[in-house]
Image (cartoon, rainbow, N blue to C red):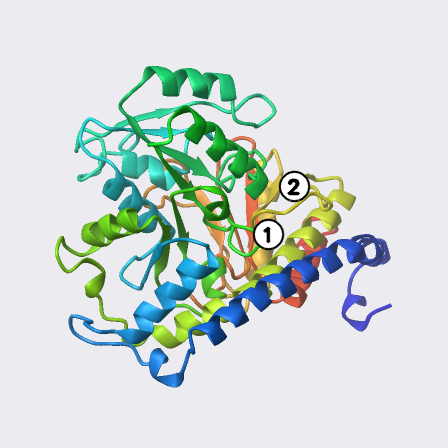
């Protein structure tokens, strides 16, 4: 028996040994995805002759920032797009999504989510919850959504009817990850089907993807298959826990230029935006992203398998196809959810002595409990767990810079929740 297991009850030691054996072939599959994606990233660094001077960054207005422009070429090439915007001035995934949507819509246009109600923070951007100044609602931009079917899939007949009968719809949005919903995340293949379906009905509609948590989890991305614009965060997958801030947009050149005008100002657009202090982290993070994303996914597989052994309700199952970092564990009660979350905090490298307390958070309607002892605040490529305190009391576990850390933390959380 491995030395690190000795403190656990015999029953838990046996379960961990069974899980290790069971998931070994699945972990090998992840290694193959990592190798493929790492080769693509390395080839692009070689293609664009990345050098030390590209890592320095710019100051002031940020004019003629060759390293910034080169990195955006690399992003566009990796995602097979015309253009990219990779900036520290975009402060989060939500900010990237907001920038993209405001850039793509005008007053009296309608934003249409075909993957159900969007994530909590995006509801604030739209203006359907909260009373925030500057929301899309305030600018006269409409919002519609179609609920998913009972099986958690897109209701294509309802979507078709909506698209045929509402000429104000200019942007169709797809949320790849589950967010705080209890449903499967959508694979690239499923997003390809959605994109083709929409474009067949109206090729002029912009298809936007909230791609947060999804980059590098598969060997393809939604932009390979006709998506016009996607958004992601640099302190999730694409920054590998190295990037300390920032987010990105990739897609159609015109849309990226509109987003740049929205982010900065019409006129200078992409030509401005200093990157001093960020470029080295952005380059290093993107280079490490395939590997670190793979480590996090391995941790999610282990989490699903071990908690499944404990009889917990988990989604996705350990052997399911992975398309993002998020692993859901449904507790159905408040107390075990809080206890498990606290254990994750106790086995984090930072603030391990802290007990997470459910509290109000900006942009969320319900109290949220969150464990995140990360080196970068809010870095969900690092191991974290969080969830709103509402039925069915689902905890969303994601990230992990190393598989070893996830394995240790989850095993101890299981021990403290189920054996003590």
At mark 1, the secondary structure is loop
Q: Position of residue 175 (x, y in %)?
A: 45, 38
Camera-nearest label, 1 or 2: 1
Q: Nearer the viewer, residue 76 or 402?
A: 76
| Numbered label tally | 2
Disc 2 designates what residue?
316
What residue is drawn where x is 57% and y is 33%?
183
Q: Which image quarter: residue 2?
A: bottom right
Q: Position of residue 237 (x, y in %)?
A: 50, 59
Is 212 displayed left or right of 248 in the figure? Answer: right
Disc 1 designates what residue?
218
Q: Which image quarter: residue 28?
A: bottom right
Q: Position of residue 112 (x, y in %)?
A: 36, 28
Gap between marks 1 and 2 measured at Cα: 15 Å
Q: Nearer the viewer, residue 403 or 280?
A: 280
What residue is drawn where x is 42% and y is 43%?
210
Q: Residue furthest bottom?
A: 52
What residue is drawn where x is 47% and y is 47%?
369
Q: Is residue 324 above or below residue 183?
A: below
What residue is drawn where x is 16% and y is 74%?
60
Q: Is residue 362 above or below residue 265?
A: above
Q: Is residue 6 above or below residue 169?
A: below
Q: Position of residue 329 (x, y in %)?
A: 62, 42
Q: Choose the circle earlier in sequence order: 1 or 2.
A: 1
């Amino acid at each position: 028996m491995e030395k690190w297991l000795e403190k656990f009850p015999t029953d838990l030691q046996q379960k961990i040994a069974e899980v290790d054996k069971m998931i070994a072939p699945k972990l090998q599959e992840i290694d193959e995805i990592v190798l493929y994606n790492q080769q693509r990233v390395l080839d692009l660094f070689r293609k664009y002759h990345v050098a030390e001077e590209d890592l320095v960054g710019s100051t002031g207005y940020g004019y003629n920032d060759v390293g910034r422009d080169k990195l955006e070429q690399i992003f566009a090439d990796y995602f097979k797009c015309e253009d990219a915007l990779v900036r520290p001035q975009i402060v989060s995934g939500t900010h990237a999504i907001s920038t993209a949507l405001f850039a793509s819509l005008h007053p009296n246009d309608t934003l249409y989510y075909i993957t159900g109600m969007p994530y909590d923070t995006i509801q604030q951007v739209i203006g359907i919850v909260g009373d925030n100044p500057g929301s899309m609602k305030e600018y006269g931009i409409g919002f519609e959504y179609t609920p998913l079917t009972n099986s958690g899939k897109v209701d294509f007949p309802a979507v078709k009817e909506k698209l045929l009968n509402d000429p104000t719809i200019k942007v169709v949005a797809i949320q790849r990850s589950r967010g705080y919903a209890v449903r499967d995340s959508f694979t690239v293949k499923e997003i390809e089907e959605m994109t083709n379906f929409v474009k067949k009905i109206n090729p002029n509609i912009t298809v936007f993807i909230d791609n947060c948590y999804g980059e590098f989890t598969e060997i393809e991305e939604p932009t390979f298959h006709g998506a016009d614009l996607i958004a992601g965060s640099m302190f999730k997958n694409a920054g590998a826990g190295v990037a300390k801030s920032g987010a990105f947009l990739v897609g159609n050149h015109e849309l990226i230029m509109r987003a740049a005008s929205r982010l900065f100002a019409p006129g200078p657009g992409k030509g401005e935006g200093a990157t001093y202090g960020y470029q080295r982290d952005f380059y290093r993070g993107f280079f490490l992203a395939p590997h670190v994303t793979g480590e996090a996914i391995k941790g999610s597989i282990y989490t699903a398998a071990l908690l499944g052994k404990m009889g917990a309700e988990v989604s996705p199952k350990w052997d399911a196809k992975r398309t993002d970092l998020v692993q859901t564990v449904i507790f159905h009660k408040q107390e075990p959810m809080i206890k498990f979350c606290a254990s994750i905090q106790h086995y984090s490298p930072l603030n391990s002595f802290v007990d997470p307390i459910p509290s109000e958070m900006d942009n969320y309607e319900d109290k949220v409990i969150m464990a995140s002892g990360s080196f970068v605040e809010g870095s969900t490529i690092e191991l974290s767990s969080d969830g709103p305190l509402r039925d069915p009391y689902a905890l969303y576990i994601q990230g992990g810079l190393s598989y070893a850390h996830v394995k240790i933390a989850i095993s101890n959380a299981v021990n403290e929740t189920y054996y003590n």
